[in-house]
Image (tube, rainbow, N blue to C red):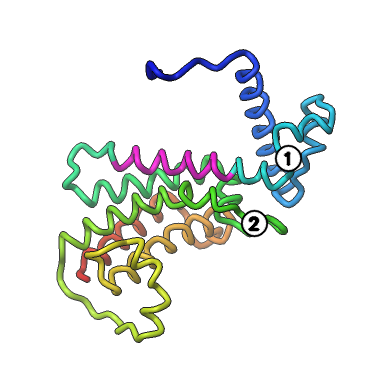
C-alpha cells in the first residue's frame, strides 16, 4: 500500500464485503436463470437482507449488471496483459500471440456465464453506460499492440480485396483505434482475427461445435496460429 493511501475503516470494509457477496450471488443467479432474470429483491432474500437495503449498494438492476461487466472485463484484461508480459522473449510474437489467446480461452471456459454476459446476447432493456468503454477496450488494446508489431514485422504480400470508399469509411473508427502504421487491409484482417477468436469461443461454449470438433483446446490453438499466420503473410 502506498504511503499516501489510508486503510479502509470498518464500515467501508463491511460495505465492500457485502457488495462482493451481492455480486457473487448475482453471478450464481445469472448462471441459474440467465441475466434477464436478475433480481435485486431475490438477491436480498438469499442474503437475508431487507429488500430495501440492497438498493443502498446498487440503485437498480442495471447498476448491478454494470458492476458485473466492469469486474469481468477487468479480470479478462488483466489476464491478457499478464499473459503477454509472461513471455520471456518479447520478440517472439508467435509465443505472445498464442499466450494471449490461450489466456482468453481459459478464462472463458472457466467462467462461461461471465463470458456470456460479456459476449452473448444483450440483456433486454440494459444499455451499458460510457463508464464501461475504457475497461472494454483494455483487452482490445493488448490485441492492437500485437497487431501493430506483427504488421511491422512484415511478410510476403498476399491477395486482398480492395476496399472501396464505403468499406473504408465503415472501418474509420477501427483505423483510428489501431493507429498509424496499420493499413486498411491490416485493420480488416485484424478485425477478422479478433471476431474469429470470440466467434470460435462462442461456438465452443454455446455448444455449436458438438459433433463437429472433438478437441476444442487443440482446435482453438490451431485457429490462433492460423490467424497469426494470415496476418504475418503481409499487409
* Residue 67, x across and y down, in percent: 60, 41
Crowd class of label 1 (few under 14; some 14 to 19; many from 20; radius 10 Å):
few
Question: Where does the image place residue 218, in percent across and percent down from the top left?
Answer: 38, 51
**Going by the image, does 180 lie left or right of 122?**
left
Disc sitting over residue 59 in the figure: 1
Magenta stretch: includes residue 186: no
Image coordinates of residue 167 in percent, x first then y, are 39, 81
Which residue is at 25% across, 47% downward? 95
Q: Residue at x 15, y 59 (%)?
A: 153
Q: Is residue 52 above or below residue 9?
A: below
User: What's the magenta bit mostly, secondary-structure-wise?
Assistant: helix
Identify the residue at the far front of this view: 4
Which residue is denoted by mark 2 in the rendering?
A: 127
Judging from the image, what secondary structure is the residue with disc 2 in?
loop
Residue 16 relative to residue 87: left or right: right
Residue positioned 36% across, 61% down in the render = 177
Magenta stretch contains residue 80: yes
Relative to 25, residue 32 above or below: below
Q: Which mark is residue 44?
A: none
Residue at mark 1 to residue at mark 2: CA–CA distance? 15 Å
Task: Give the camera-side residue of 226 and 167.
Answer: 167
Residue at (71, 49) in percent of width and height: 34
Local packing at callout 2 (Cα closer than 10 Å; few below 14, some 14-19, many 20+) is few
Residue 42 placement, left or right of 183: right
Q: Is residue 121 above or below residue 87?
A: below
Q: Are marks 1 and 2 in contact (CB under 8 Å)?
A: no
Residue 116 percent across, percent down from the top left:
59, 51
Q: Earlier in the sequence, mark 1 or mark 2?
A: 1
Q: Which residues fall within the magenta stretch?
A: 69-84
Q: Quadrant of the N terminus?
A: top left
Amino acid at each position: 500500500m502506498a504511503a499516501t493511501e489510508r486503510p479502509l475503516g470498518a464500515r467501508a470494509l463491511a460495505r465492500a464485503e457485502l457488495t462482493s457477496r451481492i455480486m457473487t450471488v448475482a453471478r450464481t443467479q445469472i448462471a441459474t436463470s440467465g441475466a434477464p432474470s436478475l433480481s435485486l429483491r431475490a438477491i436480498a432474500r438469499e442474503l437475508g437482507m431487507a429488500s430495501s437495503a440492497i438498493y443502498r449498494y446498487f440503485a437498480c438492476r442495471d447498476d448491478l449488471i454494470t458492476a458485473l461487466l466492469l469486474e469481468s472485463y477487468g479480470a479478462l484484461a488483466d489476464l491478457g496483459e499478464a499473459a503477454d508480459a509472461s513471455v520471456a522473449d518479447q520478440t517472439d510474437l508467435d509465443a505472445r500471440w498464442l499466450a494471449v489467446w490461450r489466456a482468453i480461452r481459459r478464462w472463458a471456459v472457466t467462467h462461461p456465464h461471465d463470458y456470456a454476459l460479456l459476449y452473448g446476447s444483450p440483456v433486454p432493456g440494459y444499455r451499458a453506460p460510457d463508464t464501461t468503454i475504457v475497461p472494454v477496450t483494455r483487452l482490445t488494446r493488448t490485441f492492437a499492440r500485437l497487431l501493430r508489431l506483427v504488421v511491422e514485422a512484415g511478410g510476403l504480400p498476399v491477395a486482398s480485396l480492395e476496399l472501396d470508399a464505403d468499406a473504408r469509411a465503415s472501418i474509420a473508427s477501427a483505423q483510428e483505434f489501431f493507429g498509424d502504421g496499420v493499413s486498411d487491409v491490416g485493420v480488416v484482417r485484424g478485425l477478422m482475427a479478433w471476431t474469429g477468436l470470440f466467434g470460435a469461443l462462442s461456438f465452443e461454449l454455446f455448444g455449436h461445435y458438438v459433433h463437429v470438433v472433438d478437441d476444442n483446446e487443440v482446435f482453438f490453438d490451431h485457429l490462433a496460429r492460423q490467424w497469426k499466420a494470415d496476418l504475418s503473410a503481409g499487409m
